[in-house]
Image (tube, rainbow, N blue to C red):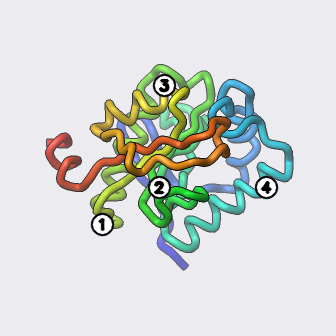
Amino acid sequence: MAEPFYHETDRLILRDWREEDWDPFWNSTNTPAVMQWLGGVLADEGMQAARMRLETYQREHGHTFWPIVAKDDGTILGFCGLKRSNQPGGPMGEFEVGWRLRESAWGKGIAKEAAQASLAIGFERFNAPRIIALTVQENTASWGLMKRLGMERREDLDFANSDFGADTIIVYSISLDKWVATDA
């Protein structure tokens, strides 16, 4: 069995999922606003399938999109972490950073703090040569964060896929060399 995952930042904890995390996670993130650019609100079957995927990523690769827990009060704020890209038509098998936060956590730098930690974990613990992030052109908040993380737009990796509610998924990436330079 893999070693338990646990990582702290100034305000946050990224860790393995626990049974008691799922209800507060879904109750606060499976909303029309949060899911607008993620394919829409999920029915029970979709939530169970997503949970299974997240748990499978952890089991098979040692990383997943981990729950983001507020250090001050233990609130589940969403998720952030790493998986291997698996969107049909996309750059399969690449390290992918991703996040999803409850509305009350928006605009507070939480996604950036969690994503920076996830990039560091990807490069330092899992030896990723580069890490990508996926979104749609209309999701300006998401690709804006990708740019603030030092990621660069990779139009050459964009691909046709409507899973996120648009016809094309756009790709940003950052290499280990670029991350080291921006992290210093």
Q: SS of the residue at dot 3?
A: helix
Mark 2 element type: strand
Q: CB under 8 Å between callouts 1 and 4? A: no
**Mark 2 vs 3, N-terminal side:** 2
CA neighbours of label 3 inside 10 A, class few (<14), some (14 to 19), many (20+) = few
Q: Residue at x 44, y 46 (%)?
A: 133
Instruction: Check contact, mark 1 vs mark 2: CB within 8 A.
Output: no
The residue mark sitting in front, 4 or 3, is 3
Disc 1, SS: loop
> In front: mark 2 or mark 3?
3
Q: Quadrant of the C terminus?
A: top left
According to the image, label 2 marks what residue?
Answer: 82
Q: CA distance from mark 4 to mark 3?
A: 28 Å
Percent across and percent down for residue 11 are 42, 34
How packed is label 4: few (under 14 Cα within 10 Å), some, or many (20 or more)?
Answer: few
Amino acid type shown at disc 2: Leu
Q: Are marks 4 and 3 in contact (CB under 8 Å)?
A: no
Q: Amino acid at mark 3?
A: Thr
Residue 30 falls in image quadrant: top right
Residue on which disc 4 sits: 48
Residues under numbered marks 2 and 3 in contact, where contact means CB atoms less than 8 Å apart: no
State the separation of the CA atoms marked 1 and 2: 12 Å
Across and down, in percent, residue 72 comes to 50, 32
In this figure, which residue is indicated by the disc labeled 1? 127
Distance, label 4 to label 2, CA atoms, is 19 Å
Q: Which residue is mark 3?
A: 140
**Local secondary structure at mark 4:** helix
Name, please, the residue furthest toward the bottom. Answer: 1
Q: Residue at x 66, y 61 (%)?
A: 53
